[in-house]
Image (cartoon, rainbow, N blue to C red):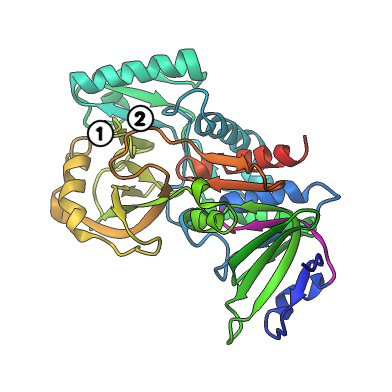
Amino acid sequence: MNCLGLRNAGLSGINRFFKRSLSAQYSHALIGGGVVGLAIAAELSKVKSNRVILLEKNDRIGMDVSSHNSEVIHAGLYYPPDSLKSKLCIQGKKIIYNELDPVKTGVNWINCGKWIVAQTDYEDAVLEGLYYKCKNELGVDVEMMTSLEAMKKEKFIQVQRSVLNSPTTGIIDSHSLMEYLLAIIEANDGEVIYGSEVVNLQYEAGCGYTVTVKDHFSDSQELTDVSTENLVNAAGLYADRISKMLLPPERHLKQYYAKGNYFKLTSAGFPGVRRLIYPVPPKNGKSLGTHLTIDMDYQMKFGPDLEYVDSPTDYAANGASIPTAFKAISRYYPYIGPDDLEVVGSGIRPKLAAPGDGEFKDFYIKQEEGFPGFVNLLGIESPGLTSSVAIGRYVKDIYHT
């Protein structure tokens, strides 16, 4: 194995992207240019002795999960207290609000708050349990409100029993966050290489990892080998495929593709709201329910719903889901009919839980035994956006503690 930063395989096209690095030895190579990969690369690039390269198969950052989501800053209400999802969500939320000042960083966010609305006695009991969990176990700020108290503040939201108010929930412009992280990488001389699909991985003790990359910008889609001491798999929807290139079959994990459709109102004039509105989560625990979100201009949209699909590229809008979405939405926003909704897009989440599996699945973030320096991330779904910078620091600590 050649332990240089790149091994030229008689290439012409890809060298225009790698020309700065022909004799480099990378300390860390990251696979995946979504918000989590960018956050990890940004944190690692801050260490002066590191030489970081990020490989992204698409022609720009964040084209998959990171640009097809609700852009919610989650408060950290739902997850087991000792889970990575809980810890990193709460840390990530604090980082956004305390460190990412919109004026100084260009990262745009709004701390608008969120309501979870109970319409039945059962749902009211669920909210009460969630309230005590937040107060006694998680340390997350929440308050219970009666239906009368709630409807005085949001008169267009139907509340039959109660509301759990989460004042630290918000929304964030994910693209502004990714651009901020990219700027940190570039300022620290990290390299981000687009159109670079990883097609093979090899590990050799004493030499590190060889990452074989296909160049999508070359007509012949030529191959180049990138050599690195350490490797991070942050490939999102494709992370299980990347992981299988290194790990033996008995250690393979499978990700499932959970698509969610998003909906908007077909016309203007419907009453607006000033915060996010969520139903009580379904019993199956697979999603948070079809909720009402707002964008940076307080324009409403609804979703996502949930359907498992066979492909990570199946973004086709599913109009057949409108009646089910209408039924869920009209419980708390009763001013619409089915014809007032249209599908405006979808997103796909990488889940470690199979369709019939009701067990909680945490983020999988682990330095793999027998593969020193290989940090593997799988099942990075919601609250991955909120947690992204905290995940970056978590992975940095794996290498630098």
Magenta-highlighted residues? 23-34
Q: Does residue 379 show up?
A: yes
Q: Residues within 10 Å of mark 1 (few under 14, many from 20)?
A: many
Q: Position of residue 140 (x, y in %)?
A: 49, 22
Residue 115 got which mark?
Answer: 2
Quadrant of the image for the N terminus?
bottom right
- Look at label 1 and name its amino acid: Ile
- Report the front residue among 293 and 383: 383
Q: Nearer the viewer, mark 2 or mark 1?
A: 2
Q: Position of residue 29 (x, y in %)?
A: 70, 57
User: Dot 2: what SS?
Assistant: strand
Q: Determine the image quadrant of residue 55.
A: bottom right
- Look at label 2 and name its amino acid: Trp
Residue 157 got which mark?
Answer: 1
Residue at x 50% of width, y 20% of height: 138
Left or right of 106 in this view: 147: left
Give above or below for 148 relative to 324.
Answer: above
Q: Position of residue 141 (x, y in %)?
A: 48, 21
Left or right of 390 in this view: 399: right
User: Dot 1: what SS?
Assistant: loop
Give above or below for 337 relative to 14.
Answer: above
Residue 287 got which mark?
Answer: none
Q: Position of residue 287 (x, y in %)?
A: 33, 39
Give above or below for 338 relative to 57.
Answer: above
Quadrant of the image for the C terminus?
top right
Is residue 182 inside the magenta stretch? Answer: no
